[in-house]
Image: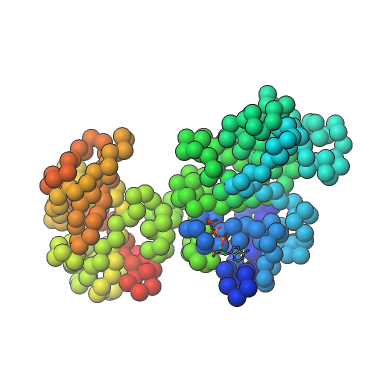
Amino acid sequence: MAEIRLENVSKSFGSAKIIEHLNLTIQDGSFTVLLGPSGCGKTTLLRMIAGIGPATSGKIYMDGEDISDVPPGKRNVAMVFQNYAIYPTMSVRENIEFCLKNNKVPKKERTERVERVAETVGLKEYLGRRPSELSGGQRQRVALARAMVKEPAVFLMDEPLSNLDAKLRVSMRTEISKLHREMGATTIYVTHDQVEAMTMADRIVIMKEGVIQQVGKPMELYDHPVNKFVAGFIGSPQMNFFDVTLKGNEVTFEDGNKLMLPEAILKKLNGKEGEMTLGIRGEDLKMDAQNLELYKENKMKAVITDTEVMGNENNLYFQFGGCQAVARVSKYEISQVGDEIEFVFMPSKIHFFDKETEMNYL
Ligand code: ATP
C-alpha cells in the first residue's frame, strides 16, 4: 500500500501541452478513478505514475519518497491495460509466473504465489490452459492475476474492462472491487465510463482537457458538482440544463414558463440575478401526486414526445423551457407519447450555473 502525490506535474508532447501544473494526492489504500472524456489526459497521467511516460516537469512521490526519476521496474507498481497482452503460447500458469521468473524468485515461492493469486481470481482450475482456451473474462483475470502476483504497492488500471461485453463488464466490476477490498492496495483506475466510476470508486478525480475539475466521493460529485461539466458528465440520462433569467425570486424559462424559488435557495444565491443556467436531474422532476400537491404553486405542464422504458424505470422526454427535457420516473408512472403531464421541480435539487464560467453557484 502507498500514498501517491503529484506535485506541480506537467506533460507536453512537442509543443502540445497536455497536462499543466497538476497537483493530486491519491490516498493510501484508496480506489481512485480517473474519469473524463476521451483525450483529457487520463492515460498520460497514469503512465507518468507508472514511470513509462515521464513527466515533463514536476515531482511524483510514493509514500513521501520522490520517485520522479525511478525507472518503471523499480516503482513497485503493476499495470493492467485495456489490451491485456497475455502471451498466447504460454499457459495461464506461465503467464502469471512470467515476471516472478524474470525477477529470479525461487521456484517454490513462485508456485505458492501463482497458486494463491489464481485461487483469488478463480483461475485455479485453468492454470494449465492456453489463453485461446479461455473466455474474455477469464483472459482479463489472467491479466489481473499477472499484476497481482507482483504484490505491488499500487495497481494502475487503464480501462481494463472496455474490451469485454456489457454483462461481463458488470461482473468484472464487482470482482475488481471485491479484490480491492480484500487486498487493500492503492488502486488507480482510468475510465471514461461514469457508471464504472460511480460503482467502483472511493474517490473520483474528474478531468477535462488535462485539468482536474473535481475530486470527491461519487455521491459528492453527483449531488454537488462544482461546475456544469461535472454535472453533465456524471449521471445518465444527463442532467437537464435550461437557459433562464432570475429576477427576485422568479425564474423565467426561455418559453415563458415561470418558477418561484424558495427563500433557502435565494439565500444561497446571495443576490445573484440575471441570465444563468438552471440544472436539474431527471429524477428530481416529479410527477407523483404527493409532490404535485407539495409544490402545487409551481406546477408545470408538458406533452410527452418520447419514452424510454428501462424496465425498472422510465425516461420521459418532453419539450420544456425551450429545449428537450427528461424526467426519470418509476415503472409505475406510465405515460405514453402524446400524454399531457404535470410536473414539479424538487427545489432542493436545483443547481444554478454561471453562464460564462459554468461554475455552480449553490
Ligand atoms: P482515452 O480515454 O481516449 O484513452 P485519455 O484521457 O486517456 O483518452 P490520453 O491518452 O492521456 O487521453 O491523451 C491525452 C492527449 O495527449 C490526447 O490529445 C492525445 O492525442 C495526446 N497524446 C497522448 N500520447 C501522445 C503521444 N505519444 N504523442 C503525442 N500526443 C499524445
Q: Is residue 198 visible?
A: no
Residue 135 versus residue 290 in the image, above or below: above
Residue name at image x 78 percent, y 40 percent: 98
Residue 239's spot in the image, x, y percent? 33, 55
Q: Front-most of 236 and 140?
A: 140
Visual colour scheme: rainbow
Residue 226's spot in the image, x, y percent? 42, 63
* Total labels drawn: 0
Q: Quadrant of ligand 1?
A: bottom right
Residue name at image x 67 percent, y 71 percent: 56
- Splitting the image into 4 quarters, where does residue 185 fall? top right
Q: Is residue 174 left or right of residue 108?
A: left
Residue name at image x 73 percent, y 43 percent: 151
Q: Front-most of 362 and 238?
A: 238
Residue name at image x 19 percent, y 66 percent: 254
Residue 355's spot in the image, x, y percent? 32, 72
Residue 215 versus residue 59 in the image, above or below: above
Q: Is residue 80 left or right of residue 360?
A: right
Q: Front-most of 228 and 284?
A: 228
Q: Residue furthest top?
A: 125
Residue 292 versus residue 120 in the image, above or below: below
For the C terminus, the image quarter is bottom left
- Splitting the image into 4 quarters, where does residue 132 fall? top right
Q: Is residue 102 visible?
A: yes
Residue 175's spot in the image, x, y percent? 57, 36
Q: Front-most of 323 and 262?
A: 323
